[in-house]
Image (cartoon, grey):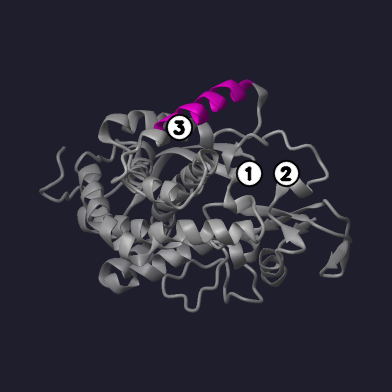
Amino acid sequence: MFVRSHALADEVLTTHDVFSSDEIRYSASEVPHRDNPVLHSMSAMDPPRHHELRRMVSRAFTPRTVDALTPAIEACADRLIDRLTPASDFVTGFAYPLPISTLAALLGVSDARQADFVRWTETITSFFGQPEARPAFLTAVAELREYLHTVPASEGIVAGLRESGLTADEIVSLAGLLLINGHETTKTLLVNMVLCLAENPAALAAVRADPDLVSSTIEEVLRVRPSVGGTDRFTTRADALGGESFAAGQRVIVSIAAANRDPAVFVDPNTFDVRRSPNPHLSFGHGIHFCLGAHLARRQAVVALRALLARLPGAWAIEDVVTRDSPVGTDVLALRLVWSAARDSRVHT
């Protein structure tokens, strides 16, 4: 079953007793990627265990925690822009390392293990059950599990999770969830941000003229180009949705991209409007599985956009885009962000 309307998408996302996130338990089909930590994390759980884990983990994503991380995010963004040129790959030069650095700080990953953290991230986030990728995936999960055992008691959120009584496997599953939902989606948000503004020069000029539009610009990027185009649920019993019957164990695919452009909810849905308000997009989900890291993702995007606007003047253009289709959409693997010749004196050329 495929859901496109905003109303039905919202119903599926908020009715967890009928539309479960627990694929392993409810899917009537084989689950080839059942070893993926994400399928054993709270994003794939129903209450009551979901609520128990979320209460434990939510303390790591409080506004106070995000505020404490913000200076490091700002410093990292400036360092990355220092090395950015119109010939650089924006993905590997900026959009990829900024959320990696943020998550490493959040998890308490030492500087000496950053390279390993990047390798684990790439391996775990790219695994979708392919037999040929399974050995590397299992190795990465084992190494991540071993490393998380060594995180000092005073660093990152891992120590707090251990003190909360989570098992080693539950902590690894949470880390896997953070790697995928916290890194991949934020990287994609940063890429989509520059794509939207390069494609809409008037919008870029507007947000340059009025910095108060930065936050609403990020929300419109999330609506027009959601980091994840869709999500799925699994029916716990036979019922009906929007007049269409379904059986127990059926996969329901929710198109976030379509729901975010539903003309019944959004005026001129295909127009990129940085002043759009209200903007009830579903890009962070809804209901009990609303993205726990939404506040942190938004903060990273706001910091990044402010820094890019300050340091990369004039109109923006996108060149040499390289993409790859994946099970959850189209990934942008590389692109060059080109701006006007005038450069901030702090940028090294």
Magenta-highlighted residues: 132-147
Say above or below: 314 vs 109: below
- Give the position of the C terminus as an image quadrant: top left
Residue 167 visible, this orientation: yes
| Comes first in the chain, label 1 or label 3 | 1
Contact, mark 1 vs mark 3 (Cβ under 8 Å): no
Q: Is residue 140 magenta?
A: yes
Among numbered discs 2 and 1, the one appearing first in the sequence: 2
Quarter of the N terminus within the rendering = bottom right
Q: Secondary structure at mark 1?
A: helix
Is residue 281 one of those drawn in magenta?
A: no
Local SS, label 3:
helix
Q: Nearer the viewer, residue 227 or 160?
A: 160
Q: CA distance from mark 2 to mark 1?
A: 7 Å
- Tell me the amino acid under the disc marked 3: Leu
Evaluate if marks 2 and 1 touch, with contact meaning CB atoms under 8 Å apart: yes
In primary-sequence order, the first of circles 2 and 3 is: 2
Which quadrant would residue 7 be assigned to in this image? bottom right
- In 3D space, how far apart are the residues under numbered discs 2 and 3 (Cα atoms)? 23 Å
Q: Which mark is residue 144?
A: 3
Which circle marks residue 39 in the picture? Answer: 1
Q: Where residue 156 appears, x then y in whole percent?
A: 33, 47
The amino acid type, in three-letter code, at marker 1 is Leu
Q: Is residue 272 left or right of residue 327?
A: left
Tell me the residue at 54%/56% (across/down): 53
Residue found 42% across the figure and 29% down from its top: 119
